[in-house]
Image (cartoon, rainbow, N blue to C red):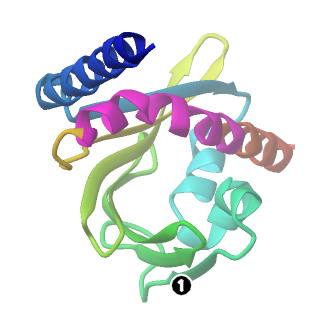
Amino acid sequence: MRKFFLVVFSVFSLLFVAAIVLGFFLSKEFTVSRSIVVQASPEKVYSLVGDLEQWPVWGPWKDADEALQVTLGEQTKGVGASQSWVGTDGDGRLVFTEADPERGVTFDLLFNEDAFANTSSITYDKSPNGLVVTWQMAGEVPAPVVGGYLAWMMPDMIAPMFDHGLAKLKAAAEAAEG
């Protein structure tokens, strides 16, 4: 019986060491991208994504965290528009770095007292089927060993929230289009 436990312990020890070693080699970078087709004009979509005062209309965050407290910056539209938040899962802030009514917005996204920085965008392109709206986030999880594992899991963790937000954005833009 003692030999059995020694073999089991050895196997688990090897698996643990292998997981740590693998963690050093996994990419810590990630990209999450989701899209939806919206039957609305770029102007209607931009009125929702280009103005942070309109984000509560379609944003998925309050649905995920009712305790979320958002504070808008002095500027809510255009390059330099900003907001910050505190919620159950931490804090963050964002700042628009690009704002184009014909293409969408790009913003720096910082979490947990700026410990994690990402670039995110909500852009759109005309297609024969409507306006293809794409929400994307790219970044890096700099934590040693576990960063690669977290980056690998990031798409599965974020994609459902993006899908939910895009569905709400679609509904709001199409309702506004009339």
* Residue 72 painted magenta: no
Instruction: Pinpoint residue 164: horizontal percent, then vertical percent.
Output: 71, 40
Residue sitting at 19 percent across and 39 percent down? 145
Say which element carries label 1.
strand
Quadrant in which residue 65 is drawn: bottom right
Find disc 1 in the rendering and name its residue. Answer: 71
Query: Which x, y percent locates residue 81?
Result: 39, 73
The amino acid type, in three-letter code, at marker 1 is Thr
Q: Nearer the viewer, residue 85 or 20?
A: 20
Question: Is residue 59 positioned above or below 170 on the image?
Answer: below
Q: Which residues are magenta?
A: 146-165
| Residue 141 locus on image (x, y percent) | 25, 45
Residue 132: which quarter of the image?
top right
Q: 106 above or below 15?
A: below
Q: Quadrant of the C terminus?
A: top right
Choose between 91 and 7: the one closer to the eye: 7
Vertical comparison of 165 with 71: above or below:
above
Q: Which quadrant, please, contains the N terminus?
A: top left
What secondary structure prevails in the magenta region? helix
The foreground one among 112 and 46 is 112
Task: Give how far across and how far down residue 157 sits, in percent.
Answer: 53, 37
Q: Is residue 50 left or right of residue 8?
A: right
